[in-house]
Image (spheres, helix red, strand yellow):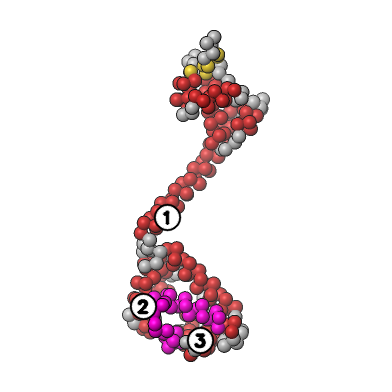
């Protein structure tokens, strides 16, 4: 039967000689033979035990707990290996997911911009997107392309944050639809809506306050129910509320 020195076993298992000395000292992995000159020699049984030790270490178990498991009279090495395999497969899946996420993040950080214009409309049916685009061009002409170009310069993270802010603002305004459109509470949220719209238009920060255009958007909400539909259902009351609130705000810009 072949026997392995400490140095040979350390190289074979990918551990240090010092680690094997430690395992010997704490009784976790004793050599099968200790020569008169105090050389440690390991046989097949020790190789298999070391494999189990390394598998359990991969699962972040402390050495004392590993020793208790391996020294248990009921310990079944085959069952243990099957459990190791299942645990490592789960870990592999997590690592694979992390690696994919890292690659995506690296690509995003390198480019720092959206990779595809389609990402502006992610989650929307293509026919809905095209209808919106055509309607917008009828009302605002080249300004639509300007807004699109402005949004495409944003990073994915920036655009995601903008969409989330717009969604939250829309839901808040919907919850206020029974309030007075000219009230301070409503107008405060309309001011947020105005700034978000300017961001989507690509005109945030310009000297023209676009009061007429903003009020005109409110008129469009009433004229075309598609702009204020929620879960596929028209919201005429909400559209009128928005029209009044937006006109009141625009008149005071």
Q: Distance between the residues labelled 3 and 1?
A: 40 Å
Q: Give the range drawn in magenta.
A: 187-216
Q: Is mark 3 on a helix, strand or loop?
A: helix
Q: Does the magenta stretch include residue 6?
A: no
Q: Which residue lies furthest to the left in this view?
A: 142
Residue 208 appears at what percent x and percent y? 39, 84
Mark 3 vs mark 2: give the one in front. Answer: 3
Question: For mark 2, does the 10 Å Cα neighbourhood hold few (<14), some (14 to 19), or many (20 or more) residues?
Answer: many
Query: Residue at the location (65% across, 29% down)?
Result: 68
Q: Is residue 108 above or below residue 72?
A: below
Q: Which of marks 3 and 1 is in front?
A: 3
Q: Position of residue 204 (x, y in %)?
A: 42, 77
The Cα atoms of the two marked residues, 1 and 2, are separated by 30 Å
How many numbered circles are shown?
3
Taking the view exactly as shown, the residue that stands out farthest to the top is 36
Instruction: Name, please, the residue furthest toward the right.
Output: 73
Closest to the observer: 16 or 74?
Answer: 16
Q: For this rendering, which residue is in front, 176 or 74?
A: 176
Q: How crowded is mark 1: few (under 14 residues within 10 Å), some or many (20 or more)?
A: few
Label placed on residue 105: 1
Is 192 inside the magenta-drawn segment? yes
Residue identified by numbered label 2: 144
- Mark 3 highlights which residue? 249
């Amino acid at each position: 039967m072949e026997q392995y020195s400490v140095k040979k076993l350390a190289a074979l298992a990918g551990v240090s000689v010092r680690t094997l000395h430690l395992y010997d000292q704490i009784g976790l992995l004793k050599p099968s033979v200790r020569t008169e000159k105090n050389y440690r020699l390991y046989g097949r049984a020790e190789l298999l035990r070391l494999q189990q030790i390394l598998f359990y270490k991969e699962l972040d178990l402390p050495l004392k707990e590993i020793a208790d498991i391996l020294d248990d009279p009921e310990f079944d090495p085959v069952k243990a290996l099957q459990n190791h395999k299942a645990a490592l497969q789960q870990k592999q899946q997590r690592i694979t997911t992390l690696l994919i996420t890292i690659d995506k993040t690296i690509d995003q950080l390198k480019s720092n911009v959206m990779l595809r214009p389609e990402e502006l409309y992610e989650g929307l049916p293509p026919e809905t997107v095209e209808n919106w685009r055509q309607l917008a061009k009828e009302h605002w002409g080249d300004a639509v392309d300007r807004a699109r170009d402005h949004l495409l310069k944003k990073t994915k993270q920036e655009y995601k944050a903008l969409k989330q802010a717009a969604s939250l603002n829309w839901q808040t305004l919907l919850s206020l639809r029974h309030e007075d459109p000219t009230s301070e509470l409503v107008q405060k949220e309309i001011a947020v809506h105005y700034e978000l719209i300017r961001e989507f238009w690509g005109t945030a920060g310009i000297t023209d306050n676009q009061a007429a255009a903003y009020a005109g958007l409110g008129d469009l909400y009433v004229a075309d129910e598609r702009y204020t539909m929620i879960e596929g259902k028209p919201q005429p009351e909400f559209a009128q509320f928005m029209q009044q609130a937006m006109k009141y705000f625009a008149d005071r810009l």
